[in-house]
């Protein structure tokens, strides 16, 4: 039993103390890494929120366009002029000559 205690004591004394300057530098680097990871996580959350908002706008636009199509029929709407150019009703009329 005394030998085992002796081995533990030897292992405990076989340590190397790193200079405080090096430790400060390593801690600074690690803290910078953690801060960047935190910022990236925040940006990803913001990105997700923006994508969700974009999808909502796309759905709203689709609903509005469907409503206009039901009211005025199929056509091309110019957002600059507000004019709808109706599409031909039959496939033969839709072919470009």
Image (tube, rainbow, N blue to C red):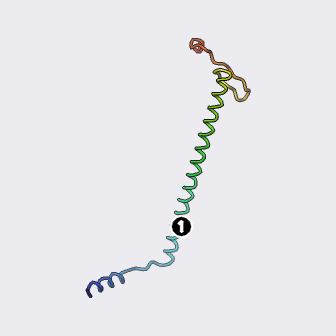
Residue at figure coordinates x 61%, y 43% from the top left:
53
- The residue carrying pointer 1 sits among few (fewer than 14), some (14 to 19) or many (20 or more) residues within 10 Å by Cα, namely few
Which residue, given by chain and number where applicable, does mark 1 sit on?
31
* Coordinates of residue 33 in the picture (x, y in percent): 52, 63
Residue at the location (57% across, 11% down)?
A: 92
Residue 85: quarter of image? top right
Q: Position of residue 35 (x, y in %)?
A: 55, 62
Element on which disc 1 rests = helix
* Image side of residue 84 versus residue 38, left or right: right
Q: How many marks?
A: 1
Q: Residue at x 66, y 19 (%)?
A: 86
Residue 87 location, quadrant: top right
Q: Is residue 10 left or right of residue 42?
A: left
86 w.r.t. 14: above or below? above
| Location of residue 15 in the rendering, given as x and y in whole percent from the top left corner | 38, 80
Tell me what residue is drawn at x 59 percent, y 40 percent.
55
Instruction: Answer with left or right where residue 71 lies relative to residue 9.
Output: right
Residue 50 position (above or below residue 83): below
Q: Judge whether 31 appears above or below 70 on screen.
A: below
Extreme bottom residue here? Answer: 2
Q: Residue pushed farthest right? A: 81
Residue 76 lies left or right of residue 39; in this view the side is right
| Residue 4 sits above or below residue 30 on the image | below
Q: Quadrant of the N terminus?
A: bottom left
x and y, in percent, of residue 66 in the image: 63, 27
Image quarter (top left, top right, bottom left or bottom right) of the C terminus: top right
């Amino acid at each position: 039993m005394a030998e085992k205690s002796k081995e533990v004591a030897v292992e405990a004394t076989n340590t190397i103390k790193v200079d405080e300057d090096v430790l400060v530098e390593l801690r600074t680097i690690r803290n910078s890494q953690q801060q960047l990871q935190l910022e990236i996580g925040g940006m990803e959350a913001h990105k997700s929120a923006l994508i969700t908002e974009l999808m909502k706008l796309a759905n709203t636009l689709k609903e509005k366009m469907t409503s206009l199509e039901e009211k005025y029929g199929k056509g091309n709407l110019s957002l600059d002029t507000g004019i709808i150019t109706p599409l031909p009703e039959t496939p033969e009329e839709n072919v470009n000559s």
